[in-house]
Amino acid sequence: MMDDAFELPAKPFFSCDEGEFAVVDAEQMGTNLSVVEPMLTLRVGPGNVFEQRPRRVVSNEEGIVNVECDGGETVTLDFNDIAARKSGPAGEFVYRAGLDEGNEGAGWMRAR
């Protein structure tokens, strides 16, 4: 579970796979010969932060990461507030739980 002090590493590496989105500290990748565990893994699934496959990170500024996904959705991960939003063809939505519960299927509610 994340706490309020969670921060992205100075050099984050984002992995967009078919079934998950992961955040890894890139500095540990270069210095550690063993496998580096992700700081955060968000799985794709119904009601999760990622309901559609993440394709690519389109921006990463000051703790706010925007991820382009299948279906024309963009998921915004706010590591400052430990929250998520998404926008797409169906409108704008807010995740009903924090990023720390992003794999719990809490679902989305319309923002407007």
Image: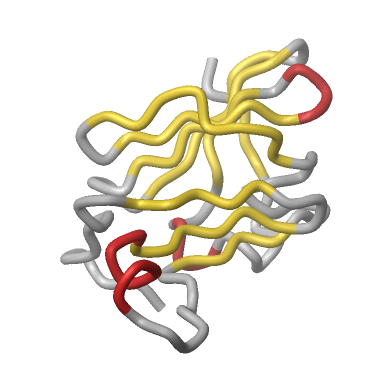
Q: Is residue 63 above or below residue 91?
A: below
The picture places residue 61, in percent across and down from the top left corner, at: 27, 29
Apparent side of residue 71 relative to residue 106 in the rendered image (left or right): right
Apparent side of residue 10 relative to residue 101 in the rendered image (left or right): left
| Residue furthest bottom in the image | 34
Quarter containing the N terminus: bottom left
Observer-nearest residue: 63 or 56? 56
The picture places residue 95, in percent across and down from the top left corner, at: 55, 44
Apparent side of residue 26 relative to residue 88 in the rendered image (left or right): left
The picture places residue 19, in percent across and down from the top left corner, at: 79, 57
Res 110 quadrant in image: top right
Observer-nearest residue: 46 or 13? 13
Quarter containing the C terminus: top right
The colour style of the image is secondary structure
Observer-nearest residue: 84 or 58? 58
Number of callouts: 0
Q: Is residue 78 above or below residue 21?
A: above
Q: Is residue 10 above or below residue 25?
A: above
Q: Residue at x 35, y 59 (%)?
A: 26
Q: Residue at x 51, y 84 (%)?
A: 35
Q: Residue at x 65, y 58 (%)?
A: 106
The picture places residue 9, in percent across and down from the top left corner, at: 25, 58
Q: Residue at x 26, y 72 (%)?
A: 3
